[in-house]
Image: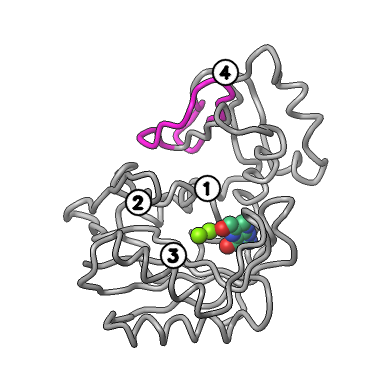
C-alpha cells in the first residue's frame, strides 16, 4: 500500500529526529521512495510552542492502516516523544495523511474511519504546513473524499484575500468573528456571511453544523470547545506561507 505521511516537530534537533524516523520506518520493512524538503512553519495552536519543522514522505508498506498507525506511534516514542499535553510541543509527530492514494485519471484511494484513525487526515485540506511539502512530492495524487488533486487543494488556499464565508449563529456573528481576528490575519481574508462558498475557490466556516468529512472546503466549528480560538488557528494555518529549509 502506498501511503503519504506527515512529519513534524518543534523540540530538539527536529531535522535529525525526522531523519532518524525515516531510518526507523525503513528498518521496519517499509520502503520510503520520496522525502520532501524540510519546511520551517509557524506553530498552529496557542499551545503549540516554537516554530515547527514539517515534511511529507511517501511510504510503500505491506501494513494495513491500523498497523502502520501503531508502527508510527512506536517510532514517535523511540524518537523521544512525550505527550505533555494535547497539541503541545513535541519532538516528533507522524500523521498518516493518505492511503493507497489514487492518481489523476486513476482510482481515488482509500478512506478509513475509526475512533483512533481517520484517513485522509482531516486537517490536510487547510494546512499549508502539510500541503506545501505534500505538493512538492505528490501534486497529482487525488484526495478520495474531495475528488481533487493535492495541487488543486493547495491552490484553493492561494488567493489573497482568501474568500471565507461565515455561517454564523446567534452567538457567533460576523462582527464578533472579525473582532476576534488580529488585523494582520484579517487583511489576508475577505469575510462575508452566507450559507455556501460564493465561488469555486471560496471556503465555508460553519458554526452550526458538526463535522462532515465529505464536504469540500467546509470548516466545522460546532464541535469545538473554543470556536473563535480554533478559527483563528485554522485561518492562520490556511494563509501562512511556510518557508523551505531544504
Ligand atoms: N502540528 C500540530 C499543531 N500545530 N503547527 C505546525 N506548524 N506544524 C505542525 O505539524 C503542527 C502544528 C498538531 O499535530
Ligand atoms: Mg499532527
Ligand atoms: Mg499525530
As measured in the structure, the alpha-carbon distance from the residue carrying label 4 to the one carrying label 2 is 29 Å
**Closer to the N terminus: mark 2 or mark 3?**
2
How many angstroms separate mark 1 from mark 2 (CA)? 15 Å
Residue 126, disc: 1
Q: Nearer the viewer, residue 78 or 186?
A: 78
In the rendered image of this protein, does residue 22 appear above or below residue 224? below
Quadrant housing residue 58 = bottom left
Whether 207 is among the magenta residues is yes
Pick the front one: 221 or 127: 221
For the N terminus, give its image quadrant. bottom left
Provide the residue span drawn in magenta. Answer: 197-216
Dot 3 lies on which element? helix
Query: Residue shown at 66%/71% (left/top)?
Result: 10
Instruction: Report the residue marked by disc 4.
Output: 194
Ligand 1 under 8 Å from disc 4 Cβ: no
Q: Quarter-wise, where is residue 24 in the image? A: bottom left
In percent of width and height, residue 204 lies at 53, 30
Query: Magenta stretch: dominant SS?
Result: loop
Looking at the picture, does residue 199 appear above or below residue 171?
A: below
Report x, y in % for residue 201: 49, 38
Residue 220 x/y as whole percent: 53, 31
Residue 243 at least partly seen: no
Q: Disc 2 vs disc 3: Cβ atoms closer than 8 Å?
A: no
Q: Which residue is mark 3?
A: 134
Q: Nearer the viewer, mark 4 or mark 2?
A: 2
**Which residue is at a point 63% across and 68% down the rendered structure image?**
90
- Which mark is drawn over residue 119? 2
Q: Residue furthest top?
A: 170
Residue at (76% x, 29% y) in the render: 178
Quadrant where the C terminus lies?
A: bottom right
Q: CA distance from mark 4 to mark 1?
A: 20 Å
Amino acid at each position: 500500500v502506498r501511503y503519504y505521511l506527515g512529519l513534524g516537530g518543534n523540540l530538539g534537533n527536529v531535522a535529525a529526529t525526522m531523519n532518524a524516523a525515516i531510518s526507523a520506518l525503513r528498518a521496519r520493512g517499509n520502503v520510503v521512495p520520496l522525502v520532501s524538503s524540510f519546511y520551517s512553519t509557524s506553530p498552529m495552536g496557542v499551545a503549540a510552542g516554537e516554530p515547527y519543522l514539517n515534511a511529507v514522505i511517501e511510504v510503500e508498506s505491506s501494513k494495513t492502516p491500523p498497523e502502520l498507525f501503531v508502527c508510527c506511534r512506536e517510532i514517535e516514542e523511540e524518537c523521544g516523544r512525550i505527550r505533555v499535553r494535547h497539541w503541545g510541543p513535541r519532538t516528533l509527530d507522524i500523521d498518516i495523511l493518505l492511503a493507497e492514494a489514487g492518481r489523476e485519471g486513476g482510482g481515488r484511494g482509500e478512506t478509513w474511519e475509526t475512533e483512533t484513525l481517520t484517513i485522509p487526515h482531516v486537517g490536510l485540506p487547510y494546512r499549508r504546513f502539510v500541503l506545501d511539502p505534500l505538493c512538492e512530492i505528490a501534486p497529482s495524487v487525488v484526495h478520495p473524499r474531495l475528488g481533487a488533486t493535492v495541487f488543486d487543494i493547495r491552490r484553493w488556499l492561494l488567493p489573497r484575500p482568501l474568500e471565507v464565508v461565515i455561517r454564523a449563529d446567534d452567538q457567533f456573528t460576523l462582527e464578533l468573528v472579525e473582532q476576534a481576528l488580529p488585523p494582520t490575519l484579517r487583511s489576508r481574508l475577505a469575510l462575508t456571511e452566507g450559507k455556501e462558498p460564493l465561488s469555486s475557490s471560496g471556503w465555508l466556516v460553519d458554526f452550526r453544523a458538526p463535522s462532515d468529512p465529505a464536504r469540500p472546503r467546509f470548516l466545522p466549528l460546532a464541535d469545538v470547545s473554543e470556536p473563535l480560538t480554533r478559527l483563528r488557528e485554522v485561518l492562520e494555518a490556511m494563509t501562512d506561507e511556510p518557508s523551505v529549509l531544504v
